[in-house]
Image (cartoon, helix red, strand yellow):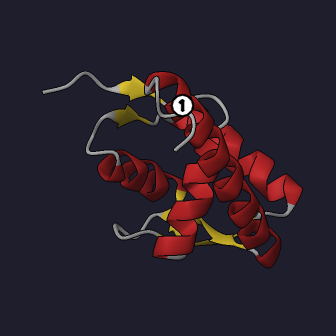
């Protein structure tokens, strides 16, 4: 089995926004597990990483939260993508695609004009 990798700085917010866009409202633990699952268990998302990112996204207005009961009937904070968060997601997706296209040019010499 491959070794788990820590989430790259600056990408966690994008993964959170995309997961909420795809899955709908989730609590922090559910978000972390879904991100790990989507990565094929190659990423490791710990609580010290996910909750500060969620707090920042909430303060920016990209996500909203409400308290509810989790699957095992425990109190949990559920996060939802806001209209502002959806716009941020679209912007970040474009920026990520542009950045990866640039890096791909360096990793594939001779493909610059493609």
Q: Quadrant of residue 79?
A: bottom right
Question: Residue 96: x and y, percent?
Answer: 63, 46
Neighbours of disc 1 within 10 Å: few (<14), some (14-19), many (20+) = some
Q: Residue visible at 75% across and 48% down? A: 55
Residue placed under numbered mark 1 in the picture: 105
> Residue 23, percent across and down?
46, 73
25 relative position to 9: left or right:
left
In this view, the residue in front, 31 or 113, is 113
Element type where label 1 sits in the image = helix
* Place of residue 86 in the rendered image (x, y in percent of width and height, measured from the top left): 72, 71
The answer to whether residue 114 is seen in the rendering is yes
Q: Residue at x 44, y 68 (%)?
A: 70
| Of residues 75 and 22, the one drawn nearer to the viewer in this rendering | 22
The answer to whether residue 45 is left or right of residue 91 is: left
Question: On screen, 109 above or below 99?
Answer: above
Q: Nearer the viewer, residue 113 or 52?
A: 113
**Quadrant of residue 102 within the rendered picture:** top right
Q: Going by the picture, which residue comes out furthest to the right?
A: 60
Q: Eyeballing the image, is 48 above or below 14? A: above
């Amino acid at each position: 089995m491959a070794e788990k990798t820590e989430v790259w700085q600056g990408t966690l917010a994008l993964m959170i926004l995309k997961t909420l866009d795809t899955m709908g409202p989730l609590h922090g633990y559910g978000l972390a597990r879904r991100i790990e699952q989507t990565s094929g268990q190659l990423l490791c998302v710990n609580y010290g990483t996910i909750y500060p990112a969620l707090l920042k996204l909430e303060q920016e207005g990209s996500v909203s939260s409400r308290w509810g009961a989790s699957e095992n009937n425990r109190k949990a904070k559920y996060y939802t993508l806001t209209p502002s968060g959806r716009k941020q997601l679209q912007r970040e997706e474009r920026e990520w695609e542009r950045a990866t296209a640039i890096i791909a040019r360096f990793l594939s010499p001779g493909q610059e004009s493609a």
